[in-house]
Amino acid sequence: MIKKTLTVSVTSVVIMMLGSNLAQAKMNIGKTLAATAVATTATKAFHKEGEEYTELIQKFSDADLLALLKSEGYAGASIKREGALRVKIDGRPHLLFNSKRGDLQLYYGVTGVDVSYKNINQWNYSKKYSRAYLDKNMDPALESDLEAEGGLTRRQVLEFLDTFIFSVSSFRSFLLEHDKS
């Protein structure tokens, strides 16, 4: 089971790094593989199989999402308010927004880090599956969206979360490397 997760994570690393700068990707693969090992411990060994994980659902309720997260071992997950769930991963809060249409958005924010717009642009230029920005307080944030048009499966939601967890791990490493404070 863990071998499958590592393979998926390594594949995600390569996909994320193969933006437009292949040479840079090759130079950074060693660092990123180390981050993958950390991210792999945060992700769950490949998700449960079965009809309930592949059934197409038009819109998840907040309670459905909470039950799914808890069933996957995210015991610290909670509903913050309607349309917003809080998920603690490696002791760090992440937010999962559930729109009225059923689209999902994951959010991770950091304080106490000083990075430039140029650095954030560099992240966005070289990465897929997430976008970074500086919020109104100039703190870095990372987001990712999953469109629900046509419905989603539980497995898609969990893979979306796994990909975001990996992105957050990479983003944290990126911020540490570019922090000017």
Image: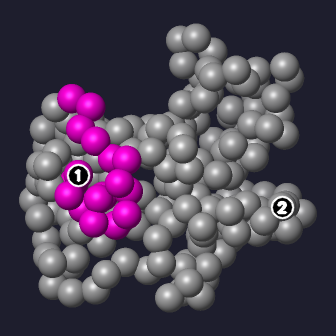
Q: Is residue 83 left or right of residue 163?
A: left
Percent x, y for residue 56? Answer: 13, 71
Residue visible at 50% across and 50% down?
A: 89
CA gap, disc 1 to disc 2?
Answer: 33 Å
Q: Residue furthest front?
A: 75
Percent x, y for residue 131? Answer: 54, 41
Percent x, y for residue 7? Answer: 60, 83
Q: Is residue 52 left or right of residue 37?
A: left
Q: Is residue 175 visible?
A: yes
Q: Residues within 10 Å of mark 2 (few under 14, many from 20)?
A: few
Three-letter code, disc 1: Leu
Contact between labelled residues 2 and 1, with CB atoms less than 8 Å apart: no
- Tell me the quarter of the picture where residue 79 sits: top left
Res. 66 mark: 1
Asked which secondary structure carries label 2, the reply is: helix
Res. 74 mark: none
Instruction: Tell whether position 77 is magenta.
Output: yes
The label nearer to you, 1 versus 2, is 1
Segment tinted magenta in the rendering: 65-81
For mark 2, what is the residue? 31
